[in-house]
Image (spheres, helix red, strand yellow):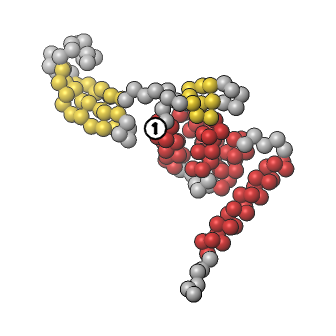
Amino acid sequence: MRCPACAATDNRVVDTRTSRAGRAVRRRRECTVCGERFTTYEYVEERPIQVLKRSGAVEDFDRGKLLASVKVACAKRPVSASAMEGVVDEIEDILGRKAGVEIPSTELGQMVMDRISPLDRVAYVRYASVYRNFQDAGEFQEFVDEMTQRQKEEALRRNQVEFPF
């Protein structure tokens, strides 16, 4: 590692810590020639994750693009920025374990919907309206009706009391 001040390669590690949720190692170094201290980060070199679009095109996974789509769905809703980051982090971790493969955009969209649903119902519907690409109001209404029915059934199951025989 070259010192940014004098370009010498002779330095020592003063402190080592993990950072960025364990995805990186932060090392504090000191140049033995000039005494300058500097920080370096080490990352695991990951294979790129490819997203297979509906059109058949393939593009690299872009965390920023996914986070932006989640933020649009959650705009003006009571969903914290940390919750949105958490959704994207969780998906990124899952995709990281599948590294080197193409993931269909439909699967990626479903992963987002599964994680947004418990956060906020309106954000879920907003995301689904783009992800599912509804062609008319009837399709959208069917989706909302199905979602409402599922919620009613879930509430019934939670409130159902079992009596002993």
Quarter of the image for the N terminus: give it. Answer: top left
Quarter where residue 61 is shown: top right
* Residue in the image at 29% along x and 32% along y: 26
Q: What residue is drawn where x is 72% and y is 61%?
A: 148
Task: Tell me the quarter of the picture where residue 157 sits.
Answer: bottom right
Q: Is residue 6 left or right of residue 32?
A: right
Seen as rendered, the residue at the extreme left is 32
SS category of the residue bearing label 1: helix
Across and down, in percent, residue 122 comes to 68, 53
Q: Is residue 164 above or below residue 97?
A: below
> From where the camera sits, is residue 137 visible?
yes
User: Residue at the location (76% across, 52% down)?
Assistant: 143
Whole-percent x and y of residue 129? 73, 45
Q: Amino acid at mark 1?
A: Arg
Q: Quadrant of the C terminus?
A: bottom right
User: Where is residue 10 shown, x and y percent of the image?
Assistant: 17, 16
Question: Mark 1 sits on what residue?
Answer: 97
Q: 100 above or below 108?
A: above
Can you name the residue that lies furthest to the front here?
165
Task: Please provide percent x and percent y for residue 163.
Answer: 58, 84
Most distant residue in the bottom direction: 165
Considering only vertical position in the picture, is 111 above or below 32? below
